[in-house]
Amino acid sequence: MQLNRSMEPLDEDHCKRTLGRTGACAMKFLIVGNIGSGKSTLARALAERSGLPVLELDRLHDGGDAPRPDPAAVRARLEGFCNASRDWIVAGTAGHLVQATLAWQPELLFLNPGPVVCLRNCRERSLDSRAAAQRLPEQLQRVADYYRRDADENSLQTHRAIYDNYQGPKRELVLPLRLHVADEIWSARQVTRE
């Protein structure tokens, strides 16, 4: 099994302790990790299995070629998304938005497969489109920088601190993402809802 670090299972007692209520736990997932770690892939796989809506923070926060959106507008869109539904999936790298999302007490999934896997995934993704191929050198540099930067909101150091300090349900996935992991995560959550 790929899940090498996890907190207690999400059972009725967990819901009462962390959410202050009994009944089925909300199905909220926050997926964080480096570029190329598999965040979008896992989010799509969970969404296919669950029908949950997905918000990709990187698309919201980074306007691509367009000017960077106003931070207050980005935060308002995040809050609107999280408040619009009891159940959802959010995925991204921006530390301040990841931190803000924790206010809804999602299950935190930290994808940390290492630089070789992230670099390989970026290279494979660049074969899918011309735009991805054009961004490849920048993406490869950002992947490498993730492991070297200190206290940058898009660094391993920041994601590690967020993960280590989060008191809610969490798992760290350190092996290359395989889609059966989505089945394992979804199956475990379904059992706790019944």
Image (spheres, grey):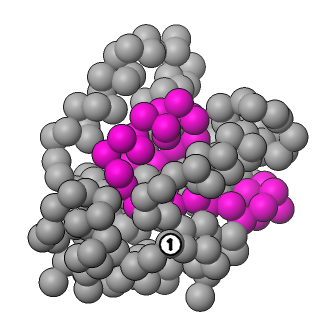
Q: Is residue 142 above or below residue 159?
A: above
Q: Residues within 10 Å of mark 1 (few under 14, many from 20)?
A: few
Residue 174 falls in image quadrant: bottom right
Q: Where does residue 99 sit, x and y in percent of width and height?
A: 49, 38
User: Which span of residues is magenta-colored?
Assistant: 90-119
Front-most of 135 and 189? 189
Q: Position of residue 66 (x, y in %)?
A: 51, 15
Instruction: Tell me which amino acid carries mark 1.
Output: Met
Picture quarter containing residue 186?
bottom left
Asked if the magenta segment contains residue 55, the reply would be: no
Residue in front for this viewpoint, 73 or 47: 73
Q: Which residue is mark 1?
A: 7
Instruction: Residue lying at the far right in this picture: please name it.
Output: 148
The spot of residue 187 in percent (x, y) is 33, 84
Residue 90 in the image: state x and y as whole percent. Answer: 39, 48
- Whether residue 48 is visible here, answered yes or no, is no
Q: Determine the secondary structure under disc 1.
A: loop
Q: Is residue 115 above or below residue 113?
A: above
Q: Residue at x 75, y 43 (%)?
A: 157
